Image (cartoon, grey):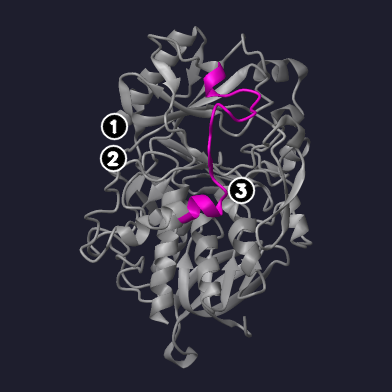
Amino acid sequence: MSGNTVDVAVIGSGFGGSVTANRLALAGQRVLVLERGPWRDSLPVRSMGIARRSPFPYGTKAITHLLHSLHRGRLNLSLNQAGMYELFDFPGLYTLAASAVGRGSTAYGSLLEAPRQPAFWQGRHPDLDPTSIERYYDKVIDDMGGVRLSREHALPQSVWTHFPELAGNRCRAADPQPHMGLLIPPSAAHAGQTIAFGPTGVQRQYCAFDGDSFLGSRSGAKASVDFVYLAPVLDKGVTVRDLCQVTRVHPCRPVDGAGHLVHFTDLATKTAGVVRASRVVFAAGTLNTLRLLFVSAQQSDGLRSIPALGRRFFANGDLMGLWLRNSAQVSSFHSTPSQGGLTVAGHAAPTFGMGGFAGLETLPLPAFVKRKLAKMFFMYGIGSDSGNASVIYDGGLRSDYNYRKEPIYDDIRSAFRVVADESGNRLSVIRKPLSVHTMGGACLAPNAEQGVVDHRGEIYNNPGLFVADAAALPAAPGGPPAVAIAAWAHHVAEGIRQSF
């Protein structure tokens, strides 16, 4: 970065932001990544020489660092700028998003799957060649060290131990299983051993089944984009400013030159800053990308008209349940992030799977609660919802998402009843879904009346502005979306690279 001018400003550092920054830096661009969250205190991040780090919410740190903020209508309650999770409470949906350098990749279940629909990108824009995105699927999985889960892996428990393949069983281990971005130890003796990863040589440890969960991966066993995509280009074209909250983006005045001005607040020093960029990439996570676009468009000197902003909002059909397994031979605390994919007879549309609660035993909870949690596992269902919902901004984000109007949830609930009946174990499901995969609202579409971005990810009527995260996805992929987001970001970055 030279002074207050860069080639590209990337807002956010999840799958969309980190992939875009990596690709453009390798193409010789000066890239500034502005991330609201902190670097997390993991083994890989320490080995990268990052001095300012914040803890994951394990142990007593859960009291102070589990929640970042709470949002409900115009109520925007900030709890801890170094907190892990941001919770939105809409009338028909809860959403949860991670706040960190690496964003959702620091807290996801390490699942890496391409969209379930082979024609996911077809017909979205007349100038979009689907293969220009699909060609990156395998690259993303390889970059993240994805391995297909197998019964041959030395796991303390898995979908195969919970659901033995017996004749007549309606619940079976999925075939094929999803890829997982996880260092699974080749034997029990390798658990917790440290290795050097990739060309940067960052340090990681094999999974020890003791905490690589949604609370974060302190050992780096679970692959996250902070060390996979940012480490190779850090200070080699990419500058990352953590704990920097972008407040608005607007076009430069003629006297300022071409490009856009990105205004931000340094949360550590409480000072305001501004940077000029030839290109700006929004990748702050769906709801934060939408909020920033709304705020920027509402300013008198702001963005040009974006008529479809907020339309076609998805929750990816996320529904989770707690499965009480009193007969489990191994504690739920001793687990991989996901224990494998599941199929349920009569329910082919959703994606199903299960996992344990590794790391929860560290939390400051009463002993009787921990004993109960040790016998609980989570079941998840994911499926394509309609995209008929929308998001607006009036001092806070609001959504008319209504799970009661989405048939996918009835399908998943019905499948969960099959799991409970066949296993003989209670499976409890919350009524209002909690989504960790919100997307849309700035969708890819053929024109500005139907969507927000074109086939290159550029915002209609706003040249030089791009959306590279899940807000741009044209539909719910019906499974874990990390690969779809990262492949889209590769595609967006390639288009930007060609435009310089």
How crowded pointer 1 is (Cα within 10 Å; few <14, some 14-19, many 20+) is rated as some
User: What residue lies at 49% left-to-right and 10% top-to-bottom?
Assistant: 423
Give the residue at mark 2.
386
Magenta highlight range: 139-161
Residue 223: which disc? 3
Q: Type of residue at label 2?
A: Ser
- Using the image as rendered, state which of residue 483 and residue 414 is in the foreground: 483
Say which label, 3 or 2, has the lower sequence index.
3
Q: Type of residue at label 3?
A: Ala
Q: Is residue 450 above or below residue 355?
A: below
- Using the image as rendered, state which of residue 476 and residue 451 is in the foreground: 476
Give the residue at mark 1.
405
How crowded pointer 2 is (Cα within 10 Å; few <14, some 14-19, many 20+) is rated as some
On the rendered structure, is 120 left or right of 89? left
Q: In the image, residue 170 lies at what x, y percent?
A: 38, 14
Report helix, strand or loop for mark 2: loop
Viewer-nearest of discs 3 and 1: 3
How far is the residue under mark 3 from the one under mark 1? Answer: 36 Å
Say which label, 3 or 1, has the lower sequence index.
3
Residue 358 visible in the picture: yes
